[in-house]
Amino acid sequence: MRDFDEGAFGRAFAELVSAHRWQEEPEYYPRYATRYQAILSRFAERAPSRRLDVLDIGGGQFAFLAAALWTDRACVADVDDSGFAGLRALGVDTFQWNLALDDPPTDRRFDAIFFSEVLAHLPVPGHIALRRLRTLLRPGGLLLCSTPNLFRLRNIVYLLRGQQLFDHFDVPEVRSYGPVIDYSAEHLAWQLQRAGFVEYTVELRDFTHVPYERRDRVLYALGSPLRRISRYRDHLLAVATAP
């Protein structure tokens, strides 16, 4: 277990994430800071205090923050390498990887993997991607995964309106996709088991971020009473252990 200081997290997030140019527009990161805080807090609860090798699938902010808060050795993998030069300049290792299409292109092993808001964009059964990640973990290594909940209020409203929920689901290609699938808690737990993780939990969470669009802000406010029922909360947060 590690100490998690909310004040230290807030300062690091403002200095290292909000103040840097990443893949998303600058306003994105302060809006979703509560998700970063929740995942890193869970990581601190489960991770040993020694220095770890951590891999971030996607933008790299989690690995960068883990390096700043606990001196972990940070590495980032993404299908898009456009941000790699900036990450390397900040002392973060990188490698390109289409997780939906290929096995890992490295023989490196890690103590923890951050996998936040990526699974919903992969046009393959979740357990395939999760198994590929498991092979990169050392025995007892941690996977921290967040992804939207299938039963979130946004999806219910879209269905009632007859709106399309997801991007078109195609065979994997060397490109990124919009969201193609959301998982329920039961479905994600099954995927983790199928991928070979021996211990896992799946929480239903609200990260209390404020939606960007005015329509979505109104919907978020109106749906607050419904989200008291855990099944309708916005996100899933899974922590899994490699055998």
Image (spheres, rainbow, N blue to C red):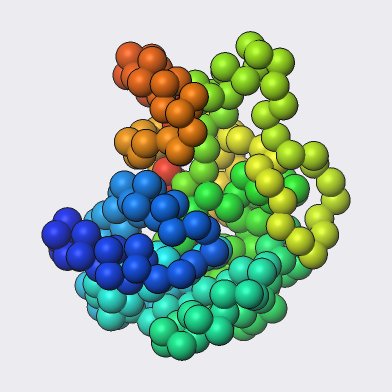
Residue drawn at (40%, 33%) of the image: 204
Residue 9 vs residue 100: left or right?
A: left
Q: Nearer the viewer, residue 192 or 98?
A: 98
Figure check: 107 above or below 23: below
The residue that appears at 42% across and 78% down in the rendered structure is 74
Left or right: where does residue 200 sit relative to residue 49? Answer: right
Relative to 107, say whether 62 is above or below: above
Q: Position of residue 96 (x, y in %)?
A: 66, 76
The residue positioned 46% from the left and 88% from the top of the image is 89
* Furthest residue toward right: 171
Q: Is residue 121 visible?
A: yes
Q: Residue furthest front?
A: 214
Percent of width and height locating residue 98: 71, 66
Residue 193 occupies which quadrant of the picture? top right
Q: Residue at x 65, y 13 (%)?
A: 161
Relative horizontal placement of residue 126, taking residue 226 as reference (left or right)? right
Looking at the image, the residue that sits furthest to the top is: 160
Q: Name the foreground residue: 1 vs 208.
A: 208
x, y percent for residue 11:
20, 65
**Marker count (numbered):** 0
Q: Position of residue 150 (x, y in %)?
A: 57, 29
Left or right of 85 on screen, residue 41: left
Q: Quadrant of the N terminus?
A: bottom left
The one nearer the camera, 44 or 142, is 44
State whether residue 199 appears in this view.
Answer: no
Q: Quadrant of residue 184?
A: top right
Q: Looking at the picture, does residue 21 appear above or below residue 152? A: below
